[in-house]
Image: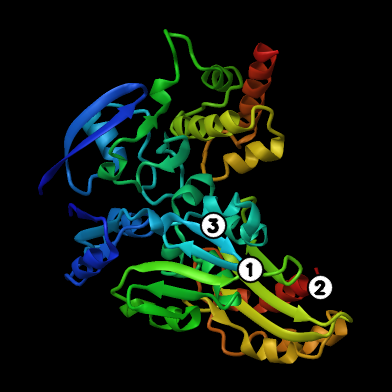
Amino acid sequence: MAKVPVQFTLNGSEKAEFIESGTTLLHALRDKIGDTSPKGGCHQGTCGACSVIIDGELRLSCLTLAETCNGADITTTAGLAEGGVLHPLQRAFLDAFATQCGFCTPGMIMAAKVLLDRTPNPSREDVVEALSGNICRCTGYEPIIQAVLTAARANSQSAA
Amino acid sequence: MPLALQTFSSVKDANAALQAAGTRYLGGGTLVVRAANEGDGSVSSLVRVTDPGLSQIAVSDGKVRLGASVTMAAIARHAELAALAPAARAVGGPAIRNMATVGGNLFASAPYGDFAVALLALDATVAAEAGEMPVETFLASRDTSRAVVTAVGFSLPEAESFRFLKVSRVKPKGVSVLSIAALLQRTADGTMTSARIALGCMADRPIRAKAAEKALLGCKLMPQEIAPALAAAGEGISPITDPIASAWYRAEVLPVHLGRLLLS
Protein backbone atom coordinates (compact mmCIF):
# COMPACT_ATOMS: atom_id res chain seq x y z
CA MET A 1 0.00 0.00 0.00
CA ALA A 2 1.34 3.42 -0.98
CA LYS A 3 2.38 5.73 1.79
CA VAL A 4 1.21 9.30 1.80
CA PRO A 5 2.65 12.31 3.62
CA VAL A 6 0.51 13.85 6.34
CA GLN A 7 1.25 16.98 8.32
CA PHE A 8 -0.80 18.31 11.20
CA THR A 9 -0.46 19.95 14.56
CA LEU A 10 -0.92 17.59 17.49
CA ASN A 11 -1.30 19.19 20.89
CA GLY A 12 0.69 22.19 19.72
CA SER A 13 3.53 20.24 18.08
CA GLU A 14 4.03 19.89 14.35
CA LYS A 15 3.85 16.31 13.12
CA ALA A 16 4.95 15.11 9.69
CA GLU A 17 4.52 11.41 8.94
CA PHE A 18 4.30 9.00 6.06
CA ILE A 19 1.32 6.73 6.60
CA GLU A 20 -0.39 4.03 4.60
CA SER A 21 -3.32 5.41 2.64
CA GLY A 22 -6.58 4.62 4.36
CA THR A 23 -5.12 4.56 7.88
CA THR A 24 -7.52 5.90 10.46
CA LEU A 25 -6.44 8.81 12.60
CA LEU A 26 -6.86 6.57 15.64
CA HIS A 27 -4.27 4.11 14.34
CA ALA A 28 -1.97 6.89 13.18
CA LEU A 29 -2.04 8.52 16.60
CA ARG A 30 -1.66 5.35 18.63
CA ASP A 31 0.59 3.15 16.47
CA LYS A 32 2.60 5.65 14.48
CA ILE A 33 2.92 8.70 16.69
CA GLY A 34 2.59 7.06 20.09
CA ASP A 35 -0.25 9.12 21.52
CA THR A 36 -2.31 6.37 23.15
CA SER A 37 -4.76 8.67 24.88
CA PRO A 38 -7.53 8.10 22.27
CA LYS A 39 -8.85 4.60 22.93
CA GLY A 40 -10.00 2.12 20.32
CA GLY A 41 -13.32 0.86 21.61
CA CYS A 42 -15.95 -0.08 19.05
CA HIS A 43 -14.34 1.25 15.85
CA GLN A 44 -17.91 1.86 14.74
CA GLY A 45 -18.51 5.42 15.92
CA THR A 46 -20.72 4.25 18.75
CA CYS A 47 -18.70 4.41 21.97
CA GLY A 48 -16.87 7.75 21.72
CA ALA A 49 -13.69 6.44 23.38
CA CYS A 50 -11.56 7.61 20.45
CA SER A 51 -12.92 11.18 20.46
CA VAL A 52 -10.45 13.92 19.61
CA ILE A 53 -10.83 17.59 18.79
CA ILE A 54 -10.04 18.52 15.19
CA ASP A 55 -10.04 22.23 14.35
CA GLY A 56 -12.22 22.91 17.37
CA GLU A 57 -14.81 20.22 16.64
CA LEU A 58 -15.33 16.91 18.38
CA ARG A 59 -14.63 14.07 15.98
CA LEU A 60 -14.24 10.30 16.14
CA SER A 61 -10.70 9.32 15.25
CA CYS A 62 -11.74 5.73 14.45
CA LEU A 63 -13.89 6.96 11.55
CA THR A 64 -11.53 9.72 10.37
CA LEU A 65 -8.84 8.89 7.86
CA ALA A 66 -5.52 10.43 8.86
CA GLU A 67 -4.76 11.79 5.41
CA THR A 68 -7.92 13.91 5.51
CA CYS A 69 -6.39 15.77 8.48
CA ASN A 70 -3.61 17.43 6.51
CA GLY A 71 -3.06 20.88 7.99
CA ALA A 72 -5.47 20.30 10.85
CA ASP A 73 -5.07 21.27 14.48
CA ILE A 74 -5.67 18.16 16.59
CA THR A 75 -6.05 17.99 20.33
CA THR A 76 -6.08 14.80 22.38
CA THR A 77 -6.40 14.29 26.10
CA ALA A 78 -2.65 13.80 26.29
CA GLY A 79 -2.21 17.44 25.36
CA LEU A 80 -4.38 18.99 28.05
CA ALA A 81 -2.04 19.05 31.03
CA GLU A 82 0.40 21.96 31.03
CA GLY A 83 3.70 21.96 32.86
CA GLY A 84 2.75 18.85 34.78
CA VAL A 85 -0.47 20.44 36.01
CA LEU A 86 -3.65 18.62 35.11
CA HIS A 87 -6.36 20.40 33.15
CA PRO A 88 -9.33 21.32 35.39
CA LEU A 89 -11.40 18.65 33.66
CA GLN A 90 -8.79 15.99 34.35
CA ARG A 91 -8.54 17.13 37.98
CA ALA A 92 -12.31 17.10 38.37
CA PHE A 93 -12.63 13.60 36.89
CA LEU A 94 -10.13 12.31 39.43
CA ASP A 95 -11.67 14.17 42.36
CA ALA A 96 -15.21 13.08 41.48
CA PHE A 97 -14.29 9.39 41.10
CA ALA A 98 -15.42 9.63 37.48
CA THR A 99 -12.62 7.50 36.07
CA GLN A 100 -13.22 3.96 37.22
CA CYS A 101 -11.64 1.71 34.57
CA GLY A 102 -10.54 4.82 32.70
CA PHE A 103 -11.15 3.51 29.21
CA CYS A 104 -13.86 6.00 28.31
CA THR A 105 -12.25 8.88 30.20
CA PRO A 106 -10.17 10.47 27.41
CA GLY A 107 -13.17 10.56 25.09
CA MET A 108 -15.41 11.90 27.82
CA ILE A 109 -12.91 14.64 28.60
CA MET A 110 -12.63 15.62 24.95
CA ALA A 111 -16.41 15.88 24.63
CA ALA A 112 -16.57 17.88 27.84
CA LYS A 113 -13.76 20.21 26.73
CA VAL A 114 -15.59 21.14 23.53
CA LEU A 115 -18.69 21.84 25.61
CA LEU A 116 -16.89 24.07 28.13
CA ASP A 117 -14.96 25.89 25.41
CA ARG A 118 -18.29 26.97 23.89
CA THR A 119 -20.53 26.98 26.95
CA PRO A 120 -18.51 27.87 30.05
CA ASN A 121 -21.51 27.60 32.37
CA PRO A 122 -23.48 24.61 31.10
CA SER A 123 -26.65 23.25 32.58
CA ARG A 124 -26.87 19.60 33.57
CA GLU A 125 -28.88 19.01 30.41
CA ASP A 126 -26.12 20.61 28.34
CA VAL A 127 -23.60 18.20 29.87
CA VAL A 128 -25.81 15.16 29.28
CA GLU A 129 -26.30 16.19 25.67
CA ALA A 130 -22.58 16.83 25.16
CA LEU A 131 -21.67 13.40 26.53
CA SER A 132 -24.46 11.56 24.75
CA GLY A 133 -22.12 10.06 22.18
CA ASN A 134 -19.81 8.56 24.80
CA ILE A 135 -20.44 5.23 26.50
CA CYS A 136 -19.20 4.35 30.00
CA ARG A 137 -19.63 0.86 31.44
CA CYS A 138 -18.49 1.67 34.99
CA THR A 139 -19.68 4.89 36.50
CA GLY A 140 -23.37 5.14 35.75
CA TYR A 141 -22.51 8.53 34.27
CA GLU A 142 -23.49 10.61 37.30
CA PRO A 143 -19.93 11.10 38.63
CA ILE A 144 -18.86 12.10 35.11
CA ILE A 145 -21.64 14.65 34.81
CA GLN A 146 -20.77 16.03 38.24
CA ALA A 147 -17.10 16.23 37.28
CA VAL A 148 -17.88 18.32 34.22
CA LEU A 149 -20.13 20.62 36.22
CA THR A 150 -17.44 20.94 38.89
CA ALA A 151 -14.82 21.85 36.28
CA ALA A 152 -17.19 24.43 34.83
CA ARG A 153 -17.71 25.99 38.25
CA ALA A 154 -13.96 26.01 38.87
CA ASN A 155 -13.40 27.75 35.55
CA SER A 156 -16.04 30.39 36.22
CA GLN A 157 -14.63 31.05 39.69
CA SER A 158 -11.09 31.42 38.39
CA ALA A 159 -12.34 33.76 35.67
CA ALA A 160 -14.25 35.94 38.16
CA MET B 1 -7.64 -4.80 4.16
CA PRO B 2 -6.00 -1.40 3.67
CA LEU B 3 -7.96 1.27 1.88
CA ALA B 4 -6.59 3.54 -0.79
CA LEU B 5 -8.00 7.05 -0.68
CA GLN B 6 -8.08 9.14 -3.84
CA THR B 7 -8.71 12.85 -3.43
CA PHE B 8 -10.15 14.94 -6.25
CA SER B 9 -10.94 18.61 -6.53
CA SER B 10 -13.78 18.05 -8.99
CA VAL B 11 -16.90 15.91 -8.90
CA LYS B 12 -16.36 14.93 -12.53
CA ASP B 13 -13.02 13.26 -11.79
CA ALA B 14 -14.43 11.57 -8.70
CA ASN B 15 -17.34 10.17 -10.70
CA ALA B 16 -14.90 8.61 -13.14
CA ALA B 17 -12.90 7.03 -10.32
CA LEU B 18 -16.08 5.75 -8.64
CA GLN B 19 -16.80 3.43 -11.54
CA ALA B 20 -13.96 1.11 -10.47
CA ALA B 21 -15.05 -2.02 -8.63
CA GLY B 22 -14.77 -1.84 -4.85
CA THR B 23 -14.68 1.95 -4.83
CA ARG B 24 -16.94 3.91 -2.51
CA TYR B 25 -17.37 7.61 -1.84
CA LEU B 26 -15.98 9.02 1.40
CA GLY B 27 -18.10 11.79 2.90
CA GLY B 28 -18.00 12.09 6.66
CA GLY B 29 -16.85 8.49 7.05
CA THR B 30 -19.58 7.42 9.46
CA LEU B 31 -20.87 4.78 7.04
CA VAL B 32 -18.03 3.75 4.78
CA VAL B 33 -15.14 3.81 7.27
CA ARG B 34 -17.37 2.07 9.75
CA ALA B 35 -18.05 -0.62 7.15
CA ALA B 36 -14.34 -0.99 6.43
CA ASN B 37 -13.55 -1.24 10.15
CA GLU B 38 -16.20 -3.90 10.44
CA GLY B 39 -14.43 -5.96 7.80
CA ASP B 40 -16.58 -5.22 4.77
CA GLY B 41 -14.38 -6.68 2.06
CA SER B 42 -16.36 -5.01 -0.71
CA VAL B 43 -14.68 -1.69 0.13
CA SER B 44 -11.13 -1.55 -1.20
CA SER B 45 -10.81 2.02 -2.38
CA LEU B 46 -12.29 5.36 -1.39
CA VAL B 47 -12.85 8.56 -3.31
CA ARG B 48 -13.46 12.03 -1.95
CA VAL B 49 -13.98 15.51 -3.35
CA THR B 50 -12.54 18.66 -1.76
CA ASP B 51 -14.66 21.16 -3.73
CA PRO B 52 -15.78 23.67 -1.05
CA GLY B 53 -19.07 24.10 -2.89
CA LEU B 54 -20.14 20.73 -1.51
CA SER B 55 -20.09 22.19 1.99
CA GLN B 56 -22.22 25.26 1.29
CA ILE B 57 -25.65 26.03 2.68
CA ALA B 58 -27.74 28.43 0.60
CA VAL B 59 -31.09 29.79 1.76
CA SER B 60 -32.79 32.26 -0.57
CA ASP B 61 -36.38 33.18 -1.39
CA GLY B 62 -37.70 30.26 0.60
CA LYS B 63 -35.51 27.76 -1.21
CA VAL B 64 -32.78 25.74 0.49
CA ARG B 65 -29.80 24.08 -1.13
CA LEU B 66 -27.56 21.95 1.04
CA GLY B 67 -24.25 20.75 -0.35
CA ALA B 68 -23.81 17.03 0.05
CA SER B 69 -20.90 17.52 2.47
CA VAL B 70 -22.87 19.78 4.82
CA THR B 71 -22.86 18.18 8.25
CA MET B 72 -25.75 17.60 10.61
CA ALA B 73 -24.06 19.96 13.09
CA ALA B 74 -23.95 22.75 10.51
CA ILE B 75 -27.65 22.35 9.81
CA ALA B 76 -28.54 22.21 13.50
CA ARG B 77 -26.80 25.52 14.24
CA HIS B 78 -27.96 27.40 11.10
CA ALA B 79 -30.42 30.08 12.16
CA GLU B 80 -32.53 29.93 9.00
CA LEU B 81 -32.86 26.14 9.19
CA ALA B 82 -34.41 26.04 12.65
CA ALA B 83 -37.34 24.00 11.36
CA LEU B 84 -34.93 21.25 10.33
CA ALA B 85 -32.81 21.34 13.48
CA PRO B 86 -34.74 18.57 15.27
CA ALA B 87 -34.10 16.20 12.36
CA ALA B 88 -30.40 17.11 12.20
CA ARG B 89 -30.01 16.75 15.98
CA ALA B 90 -31.61 13.30 15.80
CA VAL B 91 -28.52 11.96 14.07
CA GLY B 92 -26.05 10.45 16.55
CA GLY B 93 -24.17 12.25 19.29
CA PRO B 94 -22.18 15.49 18.93
CA ALA B 95 -19.13 13.88 17.29
CA ILE B 96 -21.22 11.98 14.75
CA ARG B 97 -23.15 15.16 13.92
CA ASN B 98 -19.85 16.92 13.23
CA MET B 99 -19.02 14.24 10.67
CA ALA B 100 -22.27 12.86 9.24
CA THR B 101 -23.24 14.54 5.98
CA VAL B 102 -26.44 15.23 4.09
CA GLY B 103 -25.25 13.12 1.19
CA GLY B 104 -24.25 10.21 3.39
CA ASN B 105 -27.56 10.21 5.23
CA LEU B 106 -29.33 9.48 1.95
CA PHE B 107 -27.46 6.18 1.79
CA ALA B 108 -27.91 5.18 5.45
CA SER B 109 -29.88 1.98 5.90
CA ALA B 110 -32.48 1.75 8.64
CA PRO B 111 -32.34 2.26 11.59
CA TYR B 112 -30.13 5.18 10.49
CA GLY B 113 -30.94 7.91 8.01
CA ASP B 114 -33.26 10.05 10.13
CA PHE B 115 -32.42 13.21 8.18
CA ALA B 116 -33.31 11.49 4.91
CA VAL B 117 -36.75 10.85 6.39
CA ALA B 118 -37.12 14.61 6.77
CA LEU B 119 -35.91 15.19 3.20
CA LEU B 120 -38.49 12.73 1.91
CA ALA B 121 -41.31 14.55 3.70
CA LEU B 122 -40.02 17.83 2.29
CA ASP B 123 -40.16 16.46 -1.28
CA ALA B 124 -36.50 17.34 -1.75
CA THR B 125 -34.58 16.93 -4.96
CA VAL B 126 -31.22 15.17 -5.07
CA ALA B 127 -28.57 16.64 -7.37
CA ALA B 128 -25.71 14.87 -9.08
CA GLU B 129 -23.53 15.83 -12.01
CA ALA B 130 -26.08 14.48 -14.47
CA GLY B 131 -28.99 16.45 -13.04
CA GLU B 132 -31.62 16.34 -10.32
CA MET B 133 -34.25 13.81 -9.34
CA PRO B 134 -36.93 13.60 -6.64
CA VAL B 135 -35.60 12.17 -3.39
CA GLU B 136 -38.22 9.43 -3.52
CA THR B 137 -36.85 8.25 -6.87
CA PHE B 138 -33.31 8.52 -5.60
CA LEU B 139 -33.99 6.49 -2.47
CA ALA B 140 -35.61 3.73 -4.52
CA SER B 141 -32.54 3.39 -6.74
CA ARG B 142 -29.74 4.33 -4.36
CA ASP B 143 -28.26 0.82 -4.19
CA THR B 144 -27.13 1.03 -7.79
CA SER B 145 -26.09 4.68 -7.71
CA ARG B 146 -22.51 5.21 -8.89
CA ALA B 147 -22.51 9.01 -9.02
CA VAL B 148 -21.46 11.52 -6.39
CA VAL B 149 -24.45 13.28 -4.84
CA THR B 150 -23.63 16.98 -4.90
CA ALA B 151 -26.58 18.63 -3.12
CA VAL B 152 -30.17 18.43 -2.03
CA GLY B 153 -32.74 21.15 -2.56
CA PHE B 154 -36.18 21.84 -1.11
CA SER B 155 -38.58 24.58 -0.16
CA LEU B 156 -38.01 25.85 3.36
CA PRO B 157 -41.07 24.75 5.34
CA GLU B 158 -43.04 27.03 7.57
CA ALA B 159 -42.21 26.11 11.15
CA GLU B 160 -45.80 25.16 11.91
CA SER B 161 -46.18 22.98 8.82
CA PHE B 162 -43.18 20.70 9.35
CA ARG B 163 -42.98 18.20 12.16
CA PHE B 164 -40.37 15.61 13.03
CA LEU B 165 -40.27 12.90 15.66
CA LYS B 166 -37.63 10.32 16.46
CA VAL B 167 -38.51 7.55 18.89
CA SER B 168 -35.64 5.85 20.67
CA ARG B 169 -35.21 3.90 23.89
CA VAL B 170 -32.00 5.57 25.10
CA LYS B 171 -32.15 9.27 25.96
CA PRO B 172 -31.03 11.71 24.82
CA LYS B 173 -29.44 9.79 21.94
CA GLY B 174 -30.27 6.31 20.81
CA VAL B 175 -30.90 4.33 17.68
CA SER B 176 -34.33 4.86 16.15
CA VAL B 177 -37.25 2.65 16.97
CA LEU B 178 -38.84 4.74 14.28
CA SER B 179 -38.82 8.27 12.96
CA ILE B 180 -41.58 10.30 11.35
CA ALA B 181 -41.49 13.53 9.38
CA ALA B 182 -44.62 15.30 8.19
CA LEU B 183 -45.26 18.31 5.99
CA LEU B 184 -48.82 19.43 6.61
CA GLN B 185 -50.62 22.24 4.77
CA ARG B 186 -53.87 23.46 6.28
CA THR B 187 -56.43 26.17 5.66
CA ALA B 188 -57.05 28.92 8.18
CA ASP B 189 -59.69 26.82 9.92
CA GLY B 190 -57.27 23.90 10.23
CA THR B 191 -58.57 21.69 7.42
CA MET B 192 -55.82 19.60 5.87
CA THR B 193 -55.24 20.39 2.21
CA SER B 194 -51.98 18.52 1.71
CA ALA B 195 -49.97 16.00 3.70
CA ARG B 196 -46.64 14.31 3.08
CA ILE B 197 -45.65 11.81 5.74
CA ALA B 198 -42.31 9.98 5.67
CA LEU B 199 -41.38 7.07 7.90
CA GLY B 200 -38.02 5.74 9.03
CA CYS B 201 -37.42 2.10 10.08
CA MET B 202 -40.61 1.02 8.33
CA ALA B 203 -38.51 -0.41 5.49
CA ASP B 204 -34.79 -0.61 4.80
CA ARG B 205 -34.99 3.02 3.67
CA PRO B 206 -37.34 5.97 4.27
CA ILE B 207 -40.80 5.45 2.79
CA ARG B 208 -43.98 7.47 2.54
CA ALA B 209 -47.20 6.65 4.37
CA LYS B 210 -49.34 7.36 1.34
CA ALA B 211 -52.54 5.80 2.66
CA ALA B 212 -52.31 7.90 5.82
CA GLU B 213 -51.59 11.01 3.76
CA LYS B 214 -54.73 10.42 1.70
CA ALA B 215 -56.85 9.75 4.77
CA LEU B 216 -55.78 13.05 6.32
CA LEU B 217 -57.07 15.22 3.47
CA GLY B 218 -60.03 17.28 4.58
CA CYS B 219 -59.47 16.41 8.23
CA LYS B 220 -58.71 18.65 11.15
CA LEU B 221 -56.05 17.55 13.60
CA MET B 222 -58.42 16.15 16.18
CA PRO B 223 -58.35 12.60 17.60
CA GLN B 224 -61.57 11.38 16.00
CA GLU B 225 -60.76 12.89 12.62
CA ILE B 226 -57.22 11.49 12.31
CA ALA B 227 -58.22 7.99 13.45
CA PRO B 228 -58.65 6.66 9.87
CA ALA B 229 -55.21 7.99 8.96
CA LEU B 230 -53.66 6.26 11.95
CA ALA B 231 -55.41 3.03 11.01
CA ALA B 232 -54.01 3.33 7.49
CA ALA B 233 -50.47 4.20 8.57
CA GLY B 234 -49.35 0.59 8.46
CA GLU B 235 -50.32 0.02 4.82
CA GLY B 236 -47.33 -0.87 2.72
CA ILE B 237 -44.81 -0.93 5.55
CA SER B 238 -42.21 -3.62 6.13
CA PRO B 239 -40.49 -2.64 9.37
CA ILE B 240 -36.99 -3.76 10.15
CA THR B 241 -36.11 -6.05 13.04
CA ASP B 242 -32.93 -5.28 14.94
CA PRO B 243 -31.69 -5.39 18.56
CA ILE B 244 -33.64 -2.20 19.27
CA ALA B 245 -37.09 -3.47 18.27
CA SER B 246 -38.86 -6.16 16.30
CA ALA B 247 -40.82 -5.49 13.14
CA TRP B 248 -43.99 -6.37 15.07
CA TYR B 249 -43.25 -3.82 17.79
CA ARG B 250 -42.41 -1.10 15.32
CA ALA B 251 -45.65 -1.70 13.42
CA GLU B 252 -47.66 -1.70 16.66
CA VAL B 253 -46.33 1.61 17.95
CA LEU B 254 -46.30 3.47 14.62
CA PRO B 255 -49.93 4.68 14.86
CA VAL B 256 -49.39 5.75 18.45
CA HIS B 257 -46.43 7.94 17.63
CA LEU B 258 -47.94 9.25 14.40
CA GLY B 259 -50.97 10.28 16.42
CA ARG B 260 -48.79 12.06 18.94
CA LEU B 261 -46.95 13.87 16.17
CA LEU B 262 -50.15 14.99 14.47
CA LEU B 263 -51.80 16.13 17.68
CA SER B 264 -48.72 17.82 19.13
Q: Amino acid at mark 2?
A: Leu
Q: Position of residue B237 (x, y in %)?
A: 56, 85
The residue carrying mark 1 is B62
Residue B120 visible in rendering: yes
The residue carrying mark 2 is B263
Q: Position of residue B18 (x, y in %)?
A: 22, 68
Q: Position of residue B24 (x, y in %)?
A: 27, 64
Q: Amino acid at mark 1?
A: Gly
Q: Position of residue B8 (x, y in %)?
A: 24, 56
Badge 2 density bin: few <14, some 14–19, many ≥20, Cα 10 Å:
few
Q: Amino acid at mark 3?
A: Val
Residue at image position (40%, 28%) is A76
Q: CA distance from mark 2 to mark 3?
A: 24 Å
Where residue B264 sits, quadrant-wise, is bottom right
Please state which of the two labelled residues, at mark 2 or mark 1, is closer to the viewer: 1
Q: CA distance from mark 2 to mark 1?
A: 26 Å
Secondary structure at badge 2 equals helix
Judging from the image, mark 2 belongs to the subunit labelled: B
Q: Mark 3 or mark 1: which comes first in sequence?
A: 1
The residue carrying mark 3 is B91
**Residue closest to the far front:** B61
Secondary structure at badge 3 equals loop
